[in-house]
Image (cartoon, helix red, strand yellow):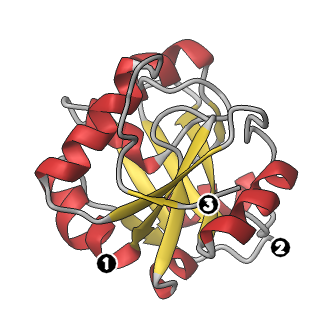
Amino acid sequence: MKLYEGRPADCTGRLEKEIRTYDLLDKLGIQFWRTDHGWMKADTMEDCHVIDACLNATVCKNLFLCNRQKTNFYLLMMPGDKPFKTKELSHQLGIARLSFASLEDMEQYLDCTPGSSSIMGIANDAENKVQLLMDEDIKAGEYLGCHPCINTSSLKLRTADVLETFLPAVHHEPIFVHLTGE
């Protein structure tokens, strides 16, 4: 695996949603690094550990969730090695029950598919239907790793750039949660 600075020189064969991600990061002046791993779709945390070694960043687990009525949607970012307990998050949010949202809703709101959900998908949520939830441990790292809305490439971004430039530009403000996995 090799780490490249910025977008690919040639975007031939890349999906439009991936190119849109690079366009937005460039427009916002956000420096980023990229590794391509089409031979290994990073749709499991085990795959992500290999990518983590290349990126040298906090690789995030991204879970797309909804309430029981399927009226509120959440993208949860948390460290990849931390266990997720639905009850713990539900309690912090004051919601009776959370579950995984459908593939159709993920595609509709984030333009991502399972295994490729990412904070970059928030840019596709122009109507702010998705609330971003971030484990507080994410903001402690200097860098974070995420997908450009596909799981055949991964990005390394400065956490401060995501919080201070990217999220305000896409009109989303995170709610920070404290997850222990217990």
Give the camera-side residue of 148 and 12.
12
Q: Say which of marks 2 and 3 sits in front.
A: 3
Task: Indicate the quadrant containing the C terminus: top left, top right, bottom left or bottom right.
Answer: bottom right
Residue 131 in the figure: left or right of residue 156: left
Which secondary structure, mark 3?
strand
Residue 172 in picture, x, y percent from top left: 24, 52
Q: Please identify, in this view, whether the residue under mark 1 or under mark 2 is nearer the observer.
A: 1
Which residue is painted at 80% across and 62% down in the image? 49
- Residue 172 is left or right of residue 41, and the answer is left
The residues bearing labels 1 and 3 have C-alpha atoms spaced at a distance of 15 Å
Q: Which part of the image, by quadrant, shows the N terminus?
A: bottom right
Which residue is the site of mark 3? Answer: 60
Which residue type carries mark 1? Ala
Q: Secondary structure at mark 2?
A: loop
Callout 3, which amino acid?
Answer: Cys
Of labels 2 and 3, earlier in sequence is 3
- Residues packed near mark 3 inside 10 Å, few (<14), some (14 to 19) or many (20 plus): many
Would residue 84 be seen by someone viewing this image from the given angle? no
Q: Residues within 10 Å of mark 2 (few under 14, many from 20)?
A: few
78 vs 95, nearest the viewer? 78
Label 1 to label 2: alpha-carbon separation = 28 Å
Q: Quick one: label 1 or label 2, which is nearer the N terminus?
A: 1
On the picture, is 51 further left or further right than 66?
right
Q: Which residue is mark 1?
A: 160
Q: What is the spatial separation of the Cα atoms under label 2 and label 3, in whole angstroms?
A: 19 Å
